[in-house]
Image (spheres, helix red, strand yellow):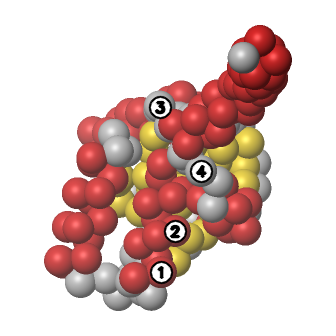
């Protein structure tokens, strides 16, 4: 192997290692058996959610994971491997991949990384079932509003009762 080729691969390992460290979440999938149309649709859905998907050689992934200090990833780097990186939303890549895997049975989630921790296939699927960030914020807001709303109803009921006594 030429020195230029080795240098190129070393640089690629550096770039992928940095992506693995910086990503909020990473989902590793086996895409074998997907049609071109399915891959195009999957990439479109990921792009809309600001998730980057790359097909990367397993050897480079192994070295990058090792360099990033992610132990236990070796088990998921086999066969055709695509990796989805998200720097913003932790749930988005898992949710998109899980939903797409239900439609296209050829897509198989192998594992991933959630906020710097190596995660199993089951953990990725559990993450995919969580509501989106906006949904969670909406739930939190409704919980916070409930006591204020109940006080307002109570004050209104007392005011109406006083008006009935006066009338």
Q: Residues within 10 Å of mark 2 (few under 14, many from 20)?
A: many
Q: Is residue 109 visible?
A: yes
> Considering depth in this image, is 159 or 13 the residue closer to the camera?
159
| Helix, strand or loop status at disc 2 | helix
Rendered view: 55 above or below 8: below
**Mark 1 or mark 4: whose residue is earlier in sequence:** 1
Q: Give the quarter of the image for residue 55.
A: bottom left
Dot 3 corresponds to which residue?
88
- The residue under the point 66% across, 33% down is 142
Q: Work out whether residue 16 or residue 43 is closer to the camera in this orientation and state it.
A: 43
Say whether marks 4 and 2 touch (CB < 8 Å).
Answer: no
| Residue 66, quarter of picture | top right
Residue at numbered disc 1: 102
User: What mark, if any, has residue 24 been given in the picture?
Assistant: none
Q: x, y percentage for residue 78?
A: 55, 72
In this rendering, position of residue 93 left or right of residue 33: right
Q: Which residue is mark 4?
A: 131
Residue 148 visible in the snapshot: no
* Mark 4, secondary structure of its residue: loop
Q: Quadrant of the C terminus?
A: top right
Question: Can you identify the residue that label 2 sits on?
Answer: 98
Q: Are marks 2 and 1 in contact (CB under 8 Å)?
A: yes
Residue shown at the point (47%, 32%) measured from the top left: 87
Query: Marks 2 and 1, Cα distance to the nearest angstrom?
Result: 7 Å
């Amino acid at each position: 192997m030429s020195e230029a080729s080795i240098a190129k691969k070393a640089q690629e390992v550096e770039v992928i290692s940095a992506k693995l460290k910086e990503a909020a979440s990473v989902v590793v999938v086996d895409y074998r058996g997907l049609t071109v149309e399915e891959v195009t649709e999957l990439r479109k859905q990921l792009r809309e959610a600001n998730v980057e998907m790359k097909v990367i050689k397993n050897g480079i992934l192994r070295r990058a994971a090792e360099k990033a200090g992610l132990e236990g990833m070796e088990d998921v780097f086999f066969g055709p491997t695509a990796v989805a990186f998200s720097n913003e939303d932790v749930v988005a890549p898992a949710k998109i991949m899980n939903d797409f895997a239900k439609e296209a049975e050829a897509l198989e989630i192998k594992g991933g990384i959630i906020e710097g921790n190596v995660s199993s296939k089951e953990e990725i699927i559990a993450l995919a079932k969580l509501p989106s960030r906006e949904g969670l914020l909406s739930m939190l807001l409704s919980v916070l509003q409930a006591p204020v709303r109940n006080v307002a109803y109570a004050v209104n009921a007392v005011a109406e009762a006083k008006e009935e006594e006066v009338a």
